[in-house]
Image (cartoon, rainbow, N blue to C red):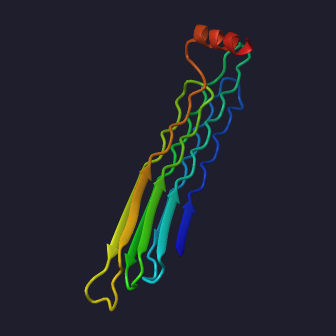
Amino acid sequence: MSDVKVTGSAGAPGQNGTLPGQAGTYGGNGGAGTATNTGNGIDATNTAEGTGGAGGVGGNGANNGAGTGGAAGAGGYGGAGNATTNIALDTVSTVHSYATATGGAGGYCTTAAGAGAGGAATSILNFNDVTANATHAISLAGASRAYGGAGGASLGSTNTGHAHWAEQRRRR
């Protein structure tokens, strides 16, 4: 069995505002997770799993002393997930090959500044059992799966009446 798993790095969190009314910075984008498995032609099962890193959370805005604060930074985008299996067959057994890619989740934001989008996913599966091989596989089984990352949440609102209502609802 040959298995390759790669996960991209998570995005850095945004910086909080430090001066009165200063906005927070955006969260960093997640890194790509790219997994490639070329197999060796003899393993009966070959898999590649690539997962993108999560986007970073946006930084909080600083209070200006008058009850309002600077804007929070938006969450970072999730990283891309990429998976590829390229198997050149030279075996008489049944061969299984799987490629699974999952995009990273978008970063969240503590206000209405905007959450990060989930990462894209690309999955590729290739078989090669050419006539030049001395032996051929009895059968081939495989799957290529791609799952986009979940979008981040925006945990705030620009409508202060709504924010007050939501806070009252949480307290119940």
Residue 59 vertical position relative to residue 52 in the rendered view, above or below:
above
Which image quadrant is residue 74 in? top right
User: Which of 3/54 is in front?
Assistant: 3
Which image quadrant is residue 62 in? top right
Residue drawn 47% across and 47% down?
119
Residue 84 vertical position relative to residue 133 in the rendered view, above or below:
above
Residue most extreme to the bottom: 134
Residue drawn 39% across and 76% down?
87
Residue 108 vertical position relative to residue 127 in the rendered view, above or below:
above
User: Which of 120/68 is in front?
Assistant: 120
Percent across and percent down for residue 91 are: 40, 85
Percent across and percent down for residue 45 are: 48, 73
Percent across and percent down for residue 121 are: 43, 52
Residue drawn 60% across and 22% down?
156
User: Where is the C terminus found, in terms of image quarters?
Assistant: top right
Which image quadrant is residue 90 in? bottom left
Residue drawn 37% across and 62% down?
124
Percent across and percent down for residue 58 are: 61, 36
Query: Seen in the image, is 68 located left or right of residue 77?
Result: right
Query: Seen in the image, is 149 located left or right of residue 24?
Result: left
Please count the marks in the image.
Answer: 0
User: Which of 139/60 is in front?
Assistant: 139
